[in-house]
Each structure stands twice: as structure tokens, then as C-alpha cells.
Image (cartoon, helix red, strand yellow):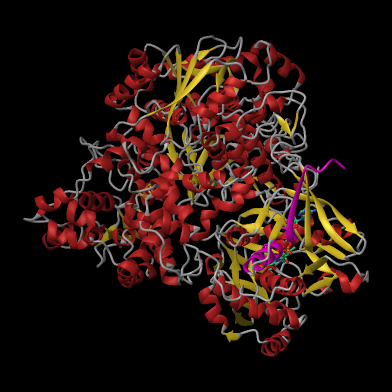
Amino acid sequence: MTYIIPTDHIELSLEQSLDHCIKCNICTSACPVSAVTDKFPGPKYVGPQAQRFRQPRQPTPDESVDYCSGCRVCNQVCPTGVRIAELNGRARAKIVQQKGLPLRNRILGHADILGMLGSGPLAPLANTMLSLAPVRYLTEQVMGIARHAPLPAFSTYTFRSWFKRRARKQGRPSILSNRKVVYFHGCATNYYEPWVGKAAVEVLEHNGFEVILAEQNCCGLPLLSNGAFSQAHNYHQGNLRKLVPYVKQGIPVVGTSTSCTLTLKEEAPELLGLHDADVNLLAEHTYDIFEFLRIEHAHGRLRTDFKPLDRTLPYHAPVSCGRTASGDLRSMCWNWCPVCT
Amino acid sequence: MQNTTRQIQTDVLVIGGGATGLGTVRDLAMRGIRTVLVEKGDLTHGTTGRYHGLLHSGGRYVVKDPQSATECAEENAILRRIMPQYIEDTSGFFVITPWDDPDYGDRFLKACHDTRVPVQEISVEEALRREPVLNPKISRVFEVPDGSADSFMSAYGIARSATQYGASILNYHFVTDLVREGDRIVAAIVEDLRTGEHKRIEATYILNTAGAWAGKIAQLADLRVNVMPGKGTMIAMNHRMVNTVINRCKLPADGDILVPIHTVSVIGTTDIHVLDPDVYGIEPDEVTFLMEEGEKMIPGFTRYRALRAWAGVRPLYREESSAVSDRDVSRAYKLLDHRKRDGVDGFISIVGGKWTTYRLMAEEIVDIVAARLGVSTPCRTAQEVIPGGEESKLYWLGHNLAHVEADDSYGDLLCECELVTRKQVVQAIRGGAANLDDVRRETRLGMGPCQGGFCTYRAAALWGEVKPDAVPTNAKNNGKLAQDGAGMPGTALVRHFLQERWKGLTSIMWGDQLRQARLDQLIYVDTLGIDLLPEHIRPPQPENELVTGHPAIATEYHHD
Amino acid sequence: MTERAIVVGAGLAGLMGALALTEAGCRPLVLAKGLGITHWVGGTLDVLGTTGNQSLRVALDDLIANNPDHPYAKLGISEIEAGIARFRAVMQQAHYPYAGSLERNMILPTALGALRPTAYAPITMVAGDMRQGGELLIAGFHELRDFYPPLAAANLREQGVAVRNVYLELPPSAKRLDYSTRTFAFFFDDPDFRQAIGRQLREVRGKATRIGLPAVLGLRDPVEAVADLQRLTGAQIFEIPTLPPSIPGMRLMNIFRRTIEAAGGRVQIGSTVHRAGGNADRLTHLYSEAAAHDQEHRVAVALLATGGIAGGGIGTDYTGRVWDSALDLPLHAPAGREGWFASRFLHREGHPIFAAGVATDDQLRPLDSAGNLVYENVAVAGMALAGSDPVQERSVTGLTVTTGWHAGNLLARAMQAHLETSN
Ligand SMILES: Cc1cc2nc3c(=O)[nH]c(=O)nc-3n(C[C@H](O)[C@H](O)[C@H](O)COP(=O)(O)OP(=O)(O)OC[C@H]3O[C@@H](n4cnc5c(N)ncnc54)[C@H](O)[C@@H]3O)c2cc1C
Ligand code: SF4
Ligand code: SF4
């Protein structure tokens, strides 16, 4: 008898990953959204279960999936590897395509536009819109993420303006180095938390890197989460155009928002079905800053002469951490950081 | 034989509650003829409930069996009209893979034209665009109007319609004997398997539509009908990897069709001669073979999740024993008028055919009976829509999900995998189901990935609440009390259904499905402790408590 | 990058192992693909269920004496007791104590009305012990599709238990479109909801001295919830576990996670270990899957606690191949798919494939088929072990907890020794 033994270990594609579901309800017991509204039947139902009833050439049979926030808690706890959040993202994209985007999502989806509206004088108004307290409370219950970590609150200046001002003032950075990185700040850092970007620049420069502030787009994650795939596609193409030239010169892209880097590396290519050479190149050479520093550390290049910090660091983008090579942020720091432990 | 306690008189008795028998009884009733149908199990207990799910376009037979091809093409169009609610318009591809003779393509195309099977060649790119997981190395693709069809739901629909026209349909009624008086068959002796009662049903005509069992029925009248039961095994894969029927473009062989039906894709079939339609199992090498044939159509096939395997027996008719293989016996059906053939009146058999041609077969046999009974009403089954299909809307995959979403009934799902609500289960229980497997045939309960892992407990519990006095227990053994042991309400239902599911699993359990079985075991053994309930501690006994344990109908997988 | 203690798997075996390592100061990192067994089983501590009327301790002695390949035989009775003791101490500290003993199994009713033996149960369940008399009331909710009082009660009655059943009304404020066990646990976290339910129960209580409810009595403080309901009804209250997700199991997970992290260990869920590297007889590296690149971990010691077939630690395919999906250790498994199953799902002996696992020496270190040590710095615990089918023996939680604890301690010692020699 001849067996065809699978020669590779390529996982089933995203859609096919529903095959792994054993209906165990673990995802449903962890989803923060279904905990606060029963209009959302939960990840098992809208994900692997509903997917068996969807067909590309027919109208979408379901709408409740629209309530999924894309937070990926379900992916993280699922013991079998079902790509629930991505399944939901694709299903929502089709709803959007067929029925249009609900206004709620249309506004929240454009982090950059919202950011532009929000930072500066209009910030307080936009901030109220973003306080999703119940969701955060439950995320904490389920994943152990601090409720009091600051929610996005618009800053009164942007990171890019600070960086440019600083460059004008200082000229070229004091340390001259042939080691360069492109810093991908993402919308959150630019509009809400410029101090995160400032810290990142300091750490990178402290380690002898020249930080390049390349032109960049929003990574597109909010749009992906809301199913606005064609706009997300444009964003990603823009980022490819702007960032790949650096990568081709051997300059890596480093980001501080785990969800942004994860989007560049995995979410956008997968959800949008983009797999060409440039896409892969960018994915491979994009790093979360902790992942990047960790690798530096592994090679004995990281300078660990930090000064102890007297403040609680905001823990942003919590859930996506699980998929990046930095892992859970806390275990990450604690892995090598002499300050926190 | 036991004394018969009851007599029933009718004009025509139909034996066999598969597609052919049900189509026949409805046709008879529509022509105003008094009629009774008996079926030894639940409806579709035979081959109809174990088929591949393909509404043939005819394409498969164009080269080898042109008559069948044309019949299929015509009936395909008719069934889409009269029973759209059970049919999904999947369309079908015939693809030439690197393993197939490239010259067959032209022969195929020409034969389609000759047999009037609608066909259109499409580009490989177009085919891959529509079915991205298809083997990119295919060289040609022909599109035909294949579809998929639900043989359970349609059987219940046809039966309901027949009943409305006055037919009487008796399931769990087993024909044990035919009464012959001189040159005429005048009655059948039937055992009611639920009560153990025997009945004598007298009829002017008895129609043998017992499919693969037609030979066994004829034997009861000392007549010889040579049916060769050909077993075919199929594997349902966990989801719709394709949405179009995929056929290999070559002479019909084994493992060369993949049918998307409801939430699954079914690969099949094998074809192995068996001696008795009641005794067969699924062999491990059949499964390996099907999985590897799947690789040729869909690269990576063996890594997808297999959900379940089952087998059915083909009712292939052969005039007298000759040494051809099952695949070479015509798929066309054969009407045997025993008056002309054997000089015995009152009895007609029809054997062979396909699900797709059930209506045509029924029309033909009823035409003869009607003429002999002096009824001149013409057949209307090609025009009259089966209730529920009036809006001409074909079934679509999203149908059930769209319903659940429309009335927010997701909190009421008992079977979450196949989206079966509490209401549907209650209806099936009230409607006379004898066990959860009957509920399954009507609702798809337990047919999804977890194979009853969650819904069995729920549905059995609900049964006790809907019909507290009629929960099947171990206490009854076909009317006689068992020697020992108390009945365990609901538990017999659970054990029986889990075992029914298990039978279809063992041959395909690896990977995700094995993990699923372990979780199901954690639920029923570890958490619920079903094995600790007293009845199970007794020495294992045959499952005779839920009707399906009767030796007459305990088919499938005798594999211990 | 420093070498560290890695635990693969966050089931009860992995968590107990991590706890042992944490307490020995080894600061383990737990990597797990997802959550698992905790959320699937009822949350009692089952040491061995096939004891009949024997004392558990005697049955364990027999098992150990007659079955040297059994994981319990590798631990010995005192290590089994040590693991149980530590487990109970942790639960006690978290205000979720377990009661019971190794003398006799208590007998708790299941959601199907079966009488199930277990050694220890959370105190929210122990009032269900059937060795006590008195009339029972089983209560539930129509809205919860995973618990049916009439079915449980009917089967209990068939076994001679005096029991009635009732469905309770949900207060209007609790009406939803959808209910899961978690929905109900959230309800029971709310004292007002408990008030409403307690009042109803008092009315329908009749002569019942004990009231069984589905195991959904809250996530926050179930002990307080039970106490509340007892005050309100005047009867003893007990929980009956039902289908996944298991609320008692979620409590366990939360307690373990808090305890381990508070003591310096880390639990990282969503990280699949899928590759290992080693030299001679030491495991040196593990790789977990992450976006675009793998995460590399340097290993001082590692605990494989991936849960066997249920946990996903053992992969299988259609050719009959059986493999360890994390470390690729050699496995003990029946050859060929034909030998994997009994013909009946509920066969009393279970199914051979479910006993597949890693064979070990008496320090729970992995052996190959020739009996040679594979890695000296790796231990295996829980359902990943060969030598038993814990579901069939009713030892799932007991075996995972005790082997996890034992393996964790052995690894802690090995790690200390290793660090001393390499420094
Ligand atoms: C593997 C396989 C795959 C197939 N796939 C397809 C397909 O994709 N498309 C298609 O069109 N066709 C397909 N067919 C063919 C099709 O399934 C059959 O032709 C059709 O279902 C036969 O229906 P029937 O009513 O004639 O027989 P059956 O459905 O077998 O009905 C006969 C009934 O008679 C009953 N019976 C037997 N003995 C007694 C008795 N003594 N007393 C009372 N009742 C009795 C049996 O229980 C049975 O229910 C397939 C067949 C097989 C085997
Ligand atoms: S956690 Fe994973 S396996 Fe379990 S129900 Fe959710 S998707 Fe399915
Ligand atoms: S991504 Fe978040 S909101 Fe969406 S289903 Fe998963 S857990 Fe729930």
C-alpha cells in the first residue's frame, strides 16, 4: 500500500483552520464581547461554526459576527489553533462589501482620521467616545490585563511633530552609526501616546541605532477589524511602497505597537490574501521592539545599563502580544530586563 | 409464525421506504389509488439514507451508459422544479487531472452532446478562481448541472405529501412473508417492530421497491430476482472545501467524486460486491484509498478533517449471474413484471436506478399498475410541486444560519454544529421518532463535527420532558420484559445514539476527529459518568430496546 | 539569553509542575497553545475511581504493586499524597477549599444522575455526597441547555435516591437571548440574583435537606455564593458539574495563574511549542510559534505536560502515525489504526489509542522504545504519560495534579544541580 505522507507541515489555510474546532467552548468562555452583550453569540458560533455555512458565491447568511471586536482573545485561548478572529474578520469584510459599513465601525475604523480629529483641541470629545469600560473590565477578568492602564487618550501634540522638531534642533543624532532602524510608530503613538515613541527612540539610540522616521500609513488593523478590506488593502500597499525600499537596504522596521507590527507581519497579508515577495520581505523584517531588543540581547549587543524607571508603564496592545515573538509583554521584560525584576 | 392479529386491505402495497418506494406511493395516491407503504426501519433506512448526495447531471454516464445519462439529465431538470427545497444548485466540474487520460475530454464532450447532458468547457483559471483548493495541475474542466440533494428531508417531504393524498405509510414494519395463492401474490405478512404484532396486508398488487433487498423480498414469493448488492463507502469531510461537485473526467471508477452537501464535502465511493445487503463493514484500506484519491483532486486532502464514514449498498440488477464487475453493470433501472416473466400476477419489482431517477421509476411502475387496476388518471409527479417548494427557491448552504440569525434563536440551539433548535427536536420527537437517530434523519442533529458530543445529552433530556411516559428504556425487549434491571430513563437514548455515531467514526478517526472523540469521552464518561449507571454494569446486551436493535434492521458495520 | 525552566502545557499537570518550580525559585515560563483540560472536566480531584468498596489507599497500593508501568507506581503513595496536599493548600489559600480523603471516595451525583466516585471535591460540591441520606432536590433553569433536573432526578430515583426536581424562574432582569454556563456564573456573582433564586428555592424546597444546582454558582466567590444560598434556603447546597466550559475548572485556572504569577512564574497562553533542539542527552532549545518568526527559548529543564490526545500533545494522522507534537519524543502507542478502538464507544476497557503516551523512567524522564533515556533534563506529566488511560480509571485530575507536582519537584532539583555544575 502506498501512503502519500504529507511532506511539509504547512498548516491548513486560515479558512480551513475551522477544521480543528472541537466545539469545546473555551473561546466562548473567554470572549470579552459576548460577556457584555448577548447580541454577540460568541467566537465558537460566529467563527468555526458559522463558517461551515458560509459560501463565497452566496449572500452572507449572518450578521452577528459584526460585533466581534477583533481582540483575538479567542485565538489565544483556543487549544486547537482555530484562527477565529481572522475568520470573523473575513466574514465581516464580506458583510461590509455586501451591506456597507455601519457608521460606528466606519468612524472607529479609521484610527488615523480619528487621530487627526482628536488630537489637539477636540481631544476630550473624542476621548469619551473611546471609553469602552465594560469591555475593558471583562478583558481584565479573562486575560489579567490591568483595567487602569490608560485607554487611548488623545495627546495634545503628535509624535512626528516632536521628532521633526527635535531633528531641527539637534541636527543629526550625536551617535553616528551604520546600524539603522526604521521606526514604525503607528497611530496610537503618533496621536495618543507620543511619549512611548520618545522612549523607543531613546532606547534605540542608546543602543547605537540611527532611528529613521520613514513615511508610513496606519497599519490598517482597525479597518481590517471592521471588515473594510479594500481600504486596508490600500493602506498596506502604501506601507509596502514606503517601507520596502529600506528593508531592501537591510534596514529593519521596528515598532512599539505590537498590534501594528503584527498587522504588517501577519494580519494584513493573511486577511487580504497577500503573499508576494515584497509582502513577505516586509513581514520578515518587521519587529516588535521587545522582540528586536531581545534578539540584540541574545547576541550580547544590548546595553542593559538602564536607569530604574519610577513609573508604571502603560501596557498597550495587550492581546496581540501572544502572537509575536516577544510573547506576553510581561514575561518578555522579565526575561531580560534587570530593572523590573 | 405467530398468529396474525390484524388484517389490512388495500389496493396496492408498496414494500420499501426509500426514494423509489416513497415516490411510488405518492404517485399512486395522487392517482386516487388506495395504497399502503411498509418499511422495516425508519424511512430512508436503506440505501437512500446512505447515498452520496449527488443530483446527477448525467455527465458521469455519458460514455458508458448513455441511456442513464439522458434519464438523469431529464430528471435533474424535473426535480429542480418539483422539489427545489431539497436541492442545492452546486453545479459540477469534470476535471482532467494528471492521472487521467487527456483524450477522454473530447470523448466526454461529444457524448454529452449525444445524450443531451448540458455541458460547457471552462478555462482552468476560471475553475481555480471558483474553487481555489482544486489541484492547479488539472488540464481541462467541463461544467455540468450537477447538484446536491438531501435524501432524508426529501423523503419526509414526499411521505407527507403522499399521506395528504390518502396513502398510509408504516415505518418499522418488516415484511416477513408473502402469501401466494396459485399464480397470484395476494398478501404480505408484516411484523410491527415496535409492538411485535404481526399484520396481514391484502392487496391487489404488491410492489417490490426494496432496492438492494428486492431479491430477498422476491424470494419470499419463491421468485428469483438477481440483485447484486454492491457496497460503496463514502467519507464526509468536516466542511465545504469546495462548493462545486468535483468529478474526475474519466470512465466511472472509485473515489472519483467529491460532493459538497449541506456543511460537508463527501468523497466517494468504493464499490465492493457483498453477499448480503445487511452484512458489511468499512475496511481500513477503503478509507486510505479514498483519502489518497482525494489528494489528486484537492492537494492536501489528507490533512483536512474527516468527519465520518458510512457505506450503502447499490441495488444493481443483473439478469443472470455473469462474471462482470459491479461497475460494469448498468446503472439503469429494470422493471420486472412477474406476470410476464414468471407467470405470477399481483407482484411487480423494480430494481436498480439512482436516487436521481426515483420519480421516473415510480412513474413507470405506477403506469402499469394503474392500467391493470383500470385507473386512467395520468401521472402528475413531473408537474406537481412537493409542498414547501412552491416558491421555486433552491436550498442554499446559508439557509439554516440565516434562519437562526433572523430570529436570534442561537440560544436555543441543541445541536450547535448543525444549528438544530429545541423546537425542531421537540417536533421530531412528537412526530413519532423512535430514537435519537430518527431525530437525526429529520433534523441533522448530531451530524456535525462533535458527532453528538454536546447534543446527545441535551436531546435525550428534552425527550423525557416532552414525552415523560414514553422514554425508551432497556425495560422492554420487543414487547417482552427483560429479565432484570430497571429502565434508565433517557440513558438508553444516549447510549444508543452515541454508539450509532461511533460506528461511523472508528474508520476515520485520527487527528482532530480523534481529539474530538476524546473530548466526547471526557464529557460522557468522566463528567456525566454514563458508564456508572447500573444498566451498563450488566453484561453487554444487544441494543434491542430502541427498535433499531432488531436483527432485521441492525445493518451496517458488523465489525466486532 | 539565559537558560530557564520551561513548562509546556497549561493543564493541571503543567500548572502543578510550574507551581513546584516556582516554589523552588526556578521562575518557570509556562508556554501553552491554549487552555484545555481545566475547562473540560468537572473540577473534582479524582484519584482513582475503580475502587469499588475498597479504601482508596488500599486500591492505590494494589495498583502500584501490580502495575509498575503505571504513573502512580512511579510516584509512590507518599508523593501522591504530597501532590494532593499541595494542591489542597493552594486552593485553601484561595478560599476555595477541597474536602475529602484518601480513605474512601465520596459519591457525587452527575448531571446525568449517575453516582460518581471522587476523592476530593471543592466544598461547593461536597454536600452532594450520596453516602449521606435525606431527601434531595435538583434544581435548574430551562434557559441553560446544559443541565436538566428531570433527567438527573429520574436516573437517581431509579437507583433508589429520594429526589425531586424543579425548574426555577429567571428574574426578568436576567433575560437574555443566549445563555452559557459562564452567563449563569456571572449571574450568581451578583448577590441580588442569589437572593431571587434563594427565595424561590425556599418555597419549593419541601422536605429536601440538600439542593443540587448546576456548577455555575459564580466565578468570583463561589463559596460565598453557596453560603448565601444556604442561608436563604435553610438547606445544604451543592454544585453538579456539567458540559464544558466548566466553571469549576475556570476557577482552578484563575487560582493557579494568580498563584504562579504572584510567586514569580509566568504563564503565556497562545504560544505553541512545535520544535525542539538538543544534543546528546540534553534538551537545549524549544521553539514556540509566533508571527513571521519563531520564538526561541533556551532550556535548563523542561516539563512536557501537553495532555495527550485530548490536550493536543499527541498528533495522529490517517496513516496511523502517532507523534509528540511539541518535543517529538518517542511514544508508546498501538501500531496501526485497526488496533486503536474497541467496537463500542462505552467499552469497559476503553480504547487502546487513548492510553498512548510517553514512557518514562521512575523520575518521569522520557525513554525511547529500547528503554534508553532521551533527555535527562526533561520530565513528562499528566495525560502525556503512557501507562494508563486516566479517563477509564477515573483518575484524570488526580493523576495530572500529582504527576505534575512530582515532575516539577524533580526538575527543580535537576535545575539546581545543573546550575551548580555550570557555574
Ligand atoms: C454508495 C452509493 C452512492 C450512491 N450515490 C448516489 C448519488 O450520489 N446519486 C444518486 O442519484 N444515486 C446514488 N446512489 C443510488 C441511490 O442511492 C439508490 O439508487 C437509491 O437510493 C435507491 O432507492 P430505493 O428506494 O430503490 O432503495 P432503498 O433506499 O434501499 O430502499 C429500500 C428499502 O426497503 C426496505 N426493506 C428491505 N427489506 C424489507 C422488508 N423485508 N420489509 C420492509 N422493508 C424492507 C429497506 O429497509 C430500505 O429502506 C448511490 C448508491 C450507493 C450504494
Ligand atoms: S476554543 Fe477553539 S476548539 Fe474550542 S470551541 Fe473555540 S474554536 Fe473550537
Ligand atoms: S476576537 Fe475578541 S471579540 Fe472577537 S470573537 Fe474573539 S474574543 Fe470575541
Q: How many marks?
A: 0
The magenta stretch spans residue A128: no
Q: Which residues are magenta?
A: B1-30
Above or below, A318 against B231 in this view is above
Which residue: 67% across, 39% down? B496
The image shows residue B471 at horizontal and vertical percentages of 61, 34
**Above or below: residue A178 compared with residue C284:** below
- A303 vs B476, nearest the viewer: B476
Q: Where in the figure is residue A160, as x and y percent of width and height? A: 17, 60
Q: Is residue A205 visible?
A: yes
* Residue sitting nearer the eye, B532 or A144: B532
Locate the C terminus of chain B by quadrant: top right
Q: Nearer the viewer, residue C188 or A264?
A: C188
Given residues B378 and A310, the one toward you in this image is B378
Above-or-below relation of B493 to C421: below
Residue B6 drawn in magenta: yes
Judged left or right of residue B141, residue C89 is left
In the displayed image of the protein, which residue is found farthest to the left? A121
Identity of the residue drawn at 32% across and 52% down:
A69
Tell me where residue C248 sits by quadrant.
Answer: top left
